[in-house]
Image (spheres, rainbow, N blue to C red):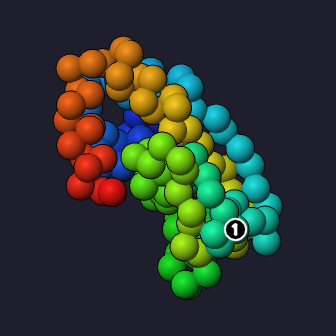
Amino acid sequence: VILLGPLLRVFQPLANAPAIMIRRLASRAISTRCAPSDFVIEQGQRTDRMFFVVKGRLKTGMGEEISQGMHYGGRAMFEDQGTAFPTSVVCITFCDLVVVFHHDFWDVVANLHPQYYEEFQEIREKVL
């Protein structure tokens, strides 16, 4: 959990979140491994999660590379019906990813840290 804190903070809305919020999100995150050529997400697929890269490299259908310490899909944290990804994301190398789900994100914010709920709602309105 402690090792994920700096990684989760690369997502701008969590950059200044209190340590306890980061620990609670980290405890709900799921780790997964992917092999080269595996699709992490396919273009147009609706999803309710975002991905943080612990190790490895991925590439979007638009040629953008996502590597260690980066994330993809943050918009999904702010859309209740999931986000239709504009491009596919494929592993270039073996990858270790951490996945955070929309429902876990909002459960932590709304139920465990209600003092931040309004702040995240404002971010949601800007994003959507």
Which residue is most to the bottom? Answer: 63
Helix, strand or loop for disc 1: loop
Q: Position of residue 38 (x, y in %)?
A: 78, 65
Q: Compared to 77, does 127 lie above or below?
A: below
Residue 123: percent from left, percent from top: 25, 47
Q: Is residue 102 left or right of residue 19?
A: right
What residue is drawn where x is 69% and y is 68%? Answer: 42
Residue linked to disc 1: 42
Local packing at callout 1 (Cα closer than 10 Å; few below 14, some 14-19, many 20+) is some
Q: Residue at x 35, y 22 (%)?
A: 110
Q: Can you say whether 51 is above or below 88 in the image?
A: above
Most foreground residue, 112 or 99: 112
Q: Is residue 20 above or below residue 67?
A: above
User: Would you identify the image quadrant in which residue 16 lies?
Assistant: top left
Give percent across and percent down for residue 20.
34, 19
Q: Is residue 19 visible?
A: yes
At label 1, which amino acid type do we have?
Answer: Glu
